[in-house]
Image (cartoon, helix red, strand yellow):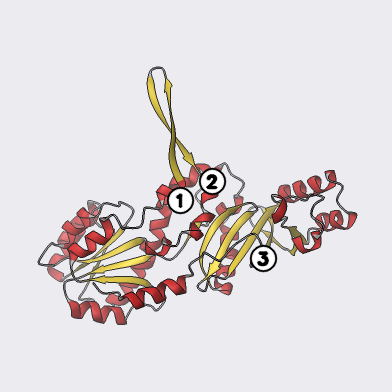
Amino acid sequence: MKPCAIQPFYFPTTVMFVDDSADFLANLSLQLGSRLAFRLFQSPFEALLALNGAGAAPPLVEDFFSLYRQREEDGHAHHVIDVRLDMIHREVHNERRFEQVAVAVIDYDMPEIDGLEFCRSIRNPAVRKILLTGKADESLAVRAFNQGIIDRFVRKQEVDVMMQLNLAIDEMQQAYFLQVERMLSDALAVGSHAFLRDQAFAGRFREIRDRLGIVEYYLACMPDGMLMLDATGTPWLLIVQTEEMMRGHYEIAHDQAAPEELLAALRGGKVIPYFWQSGGNYSPACEDWRACLHPATEFRGEDWYLYALVKNPPAFNRKYVVPYSDYLVQLDAAGRSL
């Protein structure tokens, strides 16, 4: 099964730093990127309470998978897992999404509890763990990595420790989402989102994200594509259509006796329709159909695609969406150190 070249969703998450040295944490906070959401804990037990307590943000997997029935076959009970791809883009309305701790950075040498014991105590297996070590702790860190207790270790005494740490954090944040993607892979493989597995289109998608300053994105199903938001919460809908999909739009419009001007536009391959009021396809109720056509760009990767960008898509209500920039302000206002 071909893996996804584009993750089906991504949003900024919070990084937890745990170290008993207040001076180290204070110095560390001054060297982290301004766009990184983080919390500092001098007490490892306070940190574990935040990670494992009742108030912790629920794991991502709970949103997209559900055990929806039990059946009997040959006297044996079988659990059936329902994969809900339609729930992915709804995650943008989860006001606590940025609170999820994807990465924990833990000092090894702490008096109350050492870093490895802390890592063993984290209940959510999806949290990626980076251990900060001294020179004497390196052999312990190697063994812990080989045993799967930690995912990375960074030596505090290295001259370029902050560069190494920032690189490791970025890598572990990506790995956090890859875990869920692997669980979704079977459903994505049989779906219509072929562009997710196209390496060439993934490059174009990165260019689009960088140009628009996108910080979070979510797979969309009606129409196929990606719902994307920048740090201020401005939404963009990237609609991606294959030749077969465009042919389907034309055939449905033709069967619905659409105006010849619309049919000609659909045949021409220069626009993508977004009939958001009628389930994605043309209907005679679409009187202002011209407003539903968006300039399209042709792209040839492993397949042929047309894609269009729609700013502030009309079907998307941003009223209850918490922008990432607001979350960073909330963190600063509440105080990041505990």
Where's the C terminus, which quadrant?
Answer: bottom left
In this view, the residue farthest toward the right is 260
**Residue shown at the point (26%, 55%) measured from the top left:** 52
Q: Is residue 159 visible?
A: no
- Residue depicted at 59% across the width and 62% down the height: 317
Report the residue marked by disc 2.
188
Q: Which of label 1 and label 3 is nearer to you?
A: 3
Q: How many marks?
A: 3
Disc with the residue nearer the chain's start (3 vs 2): 2
Amino acid type, label 3:
Val
Could you say whether the residue bearing mark 2 is in a helix, strand or loop? helix
Q: Nearer the viewer, residue 125 or 49?
A: 49
Give how far across and how far down residue 77 sits, in percent.
Answer: 38, 25
* Between 186 and 304, the one nearer to me in the picture: 186
As helix, strand or loop, the secondary structure at mark 1 comes to helix
Residue at 27% x, 75% y is: 161
The crowd level at tag 1 (other Cα within 10 Å; few <14, some 14-19, many 20+) is many
Q: Are marks 1 and 3 in contact (CB under 8 Å)?
A: no
- For this view, does 181 lie left or right of residue 163? right
- Quadrant of the rendered image containing residue 198: bottom right
**Label 2 close to label 1 by CB (< 8 Å):** yes
State whether residue 186 appears in this view.
Answer: yes
x and y percentages locating residue 312 in the rendered image: 63, 67
Tag 3 near tag 2, CB within 8 Å: no
User: Which residue occupies 49% across, 46% down?
Assistant: 185
Real-space Cα separation, disc 2 to disc 1, in angstroms:
9 Å
Q: Which residue was labeled with disc 1?
A: 181
Is 82 placed above or below 119 here? Answer: above
Q: Which residue is mark 3?
A: 310
